[in-house]
Image: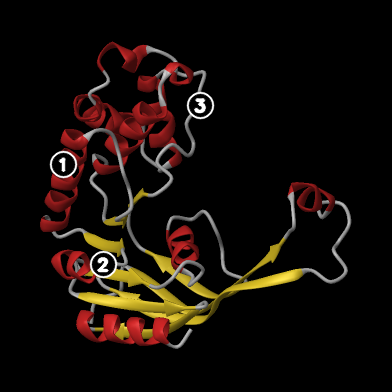
Amino acid sequence: MAQPIISFKNVSKEYILYKNEQERFKALFIKPKKPKINKALKNVSFEIHKGESVGIIGDNGAGKSTILKMITGVAFPDEGEIEVNGKVAALLELTAGFSTEMTGRENIYLKGYILGLNDEYIRTIEERIIDFAQLGDYIDQPVRTYSSGMRLRLGFAINVNIEPDILVVDEALAVGDASFKKKCKDKINEIIKSGVTVLYVSHNENSVAEVCNRAIYLKKGQLMFDGDIPTAFEKYKEGKAKK
């Protein structure tokens, strides 16, 4: 079998929970004596191959966001091994990495550098990004002058136009007015149909079934099921009923 595009082997991750920002700041200098620990992931293993569309389901705190952060390189495991073989576009924190003093056009290059792209490649997709974002003359104004919606548009436009190998999507993503949301959804569907590997976070069975051919169900940091979508949601509903 071909090498997986994403591989998690016995991955675990813990976070210290702080009561407030003051406690978090104090912990930079003094190690907490009895910290409250959140075990975000507990010995999680799975493989995803090129071209698969996989739904990730589970309640808040199940570990979905931690997995996505690790795939995008924002977080790292305490134990275990992770391999990601391809360019990742994450439709999650769309404005992360923007400089508010730089223009929208300059931020296209900045975000591109963060994603590991070179000048030559960014130039080939620059106008495509600008056309998709529909920001008009604002593209050459500092991002600090943008509304939150305009920033999201630019972030989305960059991520969907970098020709990713892996697309990470949160269904809860909302960008702009109704017509722009439809444009975003159509673009996501176009990327999916092109054979890109997709990780899709949702609580809606119909939505997952429409996009994916497999689902991973997480509960309190543990992988409870990995397989067909109807069974995954059946186990998810059983898990919620046992709360």
Q: Nearer the viewer, residue 144 or 102?
A: 144
Q: Nearer the viewer, residue 118 or 27?
A: 27
Task: Return the residue at label 2.
Answer: 204
Which residue appears at 40% of the width and 23% of the height? 147
Q: Is residue 161 rendered to the left or right of residue 194?
A: right
Q: Is residue 51 rendered to the left or right of residue 116?
A: left
Disc 2 to disc 1, C-alpha distance: 18 Å
Q: Earlier in the sequence, mark 3 or mark 2?
A: 3
Which residue appears at 31% of the width and 32% of the height? 153
Task: Return the residue at label 1.
Answer: 182
Disc 3 to disc 2, C-alpha distance: 35 Å
- Dots 3, 2 in contact, CB < 8 A: no
Indicate the secondary structure of the residue bearing disc 2: loop
In this view, 233 is above or below 111: below
Q: Position of residue 99 (x, y in %)?
A: 50, 26
The quarter of the picture where residue 135 lies is top left
Disc 3 crowd rating (10 Å Cα; few below 14, some 14-19, many 20+) is some
Q: Position of residue 211 (x, y in %)?
A: 17, 64
Q: Quadrant of the N terminus?
A: bottom left
Q: Nearer the viewer, residue 195 or 14?
A: 14
Disc 1 to disc 3, C-alpha distance: 28 Å
- Residue type at numbered disc 3: Ser
Q: Earlier in the sequence, mark 2 or mark 1?
A: 1
Task: Return the residue at label 3.
Answer: 99
Indicate the secondary structure of the residue bearing disc 3: loop
- The coloring applied to the image is secondary structure
Q: Position of residue 74 (x, y in %)?
A: 52, 54
In this view, 116 is above or below 23: above
- Residue type at numbered disc 1: Lys
Which residue appears at 41% of the width and 35% of the height? 111
